[in-house]
Image (cartoon, rainbow, N blue to C red):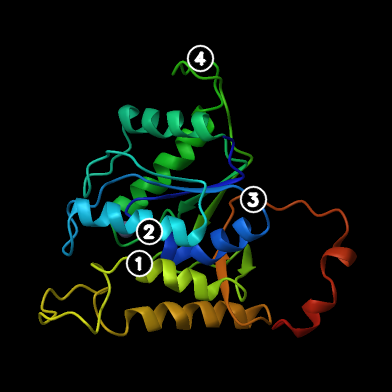
Amino acid sequence: MDLDALAFGAHADDVELACGGTLVALAALGHKTGVIVLTRGEMGTRGSAKIRAREFASSARIMGLTVHRMLDISDGRVEVTWTNKLKIIKALRAHRPKIVFAPYWIDRHPDHEQASHLVRQAAYLSGLVKVETGQPPFRPRKVVYYPSRFEFTPSFIGDISGSHEQKMKAVRAYKSQFHNQDRAEPETDGTLIGRPDFLESIETRDRYYGGTIGVKYGEPFLVREAIKLNDPVEFFGPEYQWARP
Ligand SMILES: [Zn+2]
C-alpha cells in the first residue's frame, strides 16, 4: 500500500521524539503514515533488541501507523554503503511515500548523521531505472529533516497542539528507555534519556516551538530547497497575526 508520509529513524524512539506529533496529526487527517527504523537497537544501553521491537510495535499502534518496520542495519555502525542504500531503496519502492522524514545531517550520534545521508541518497537513487531491485523506480517528492540533539533554523513548524498528548503516549511506550517511577531497580546507567527530566525537556521543546508560531505545541522541520508559494497573502492567513514576528 502506498504511503503519504514515511519517517526514517536510526533507532526506535528517534522518530517519536522528534516528529511523533506530526505523524499522529497526519494520520488524523486521513494520511497513510509509516516509520522505518534502520537498526534493531541492540547496542542501546537500556533494554534489548527484543524489548525495543515490542515497544516499537505498541508505539506504532498509538500513532496510528499503517506501516512500521525495522531494517537490519547494525546498531552503532550505520554507514553509507551500497548494501545499506539498497535496503532503503527497496523500502521506498515498496511503500512509495509522497514525503519522507529523515534525521538532520548534523548530530551527536554518528548513526543519526549517517542515517540522514543514507536516506537522502537512497531517496534520489530510488528514482533511477537502472538501480535494479525488481521493483519499479520511485522517488519521493521531498525529504524533510527533523532535529535530534542539534537545533536548526526551521523551514516550517508543524502545529501538534492536537496530537501532543498522543505523541507523549507513543514516547512513553518505550518503557525500557525512559525514566519510569515504577522501576524497582535504581537508575544507575546514566543515560541522558533515562533521566527523570528528559521527557519534560521534550515537552518544553515542543512548547517552545509551538510558541514561535502562536500555538501550544509544535515540531520544527528543515528542507534544503526553497518552498514554492503561489499566493503569500492567502498563505499567511489571520493566524500569523499571533505568531512571533
Ligand atoms: Zn537514535
Q: Are marks 1 and 3 in contact (CB under 8 Å)?
A: no
SS under mark 3: loop
Question: Could you tell me residue 154's position as x and y percent?
Answer: 58, 66
Task: Name the amino acid, label 3.
Answer: His
Per the rendering, the mark at residue 130 is 4
Q: Which residue is mark 2?
A: 58
Residue placed most toward the observer, 57 or 164: 57
Q: Which residue is mark 3?
A: 31
* Neighbours of disc 1 within 10 Å: few (<14), some (14-19), many (20+): many
Q: Which residue is mark 1?
A: 173
Residue 60, placed above or below residue 234? above
* Residue at x 45%, y 57% (from the top left corner): 61
Q: Distance between the Cα atoms at labels 1 and 3?
A: 23 Å
Question: Could you tell me residue 29's position as x and y percent?
Answer: 68, 58
Residue placed most toward the observer, 39 or 180: 180
The image quarter in which residue 86 lies? top left
Q: Distance between the Cα atoms at labels 4 and 1?
A: 41 Å
Of callouts 1 and 3, which one flags the residue occurring earlier in the amino acid sequence?
Answer: 3
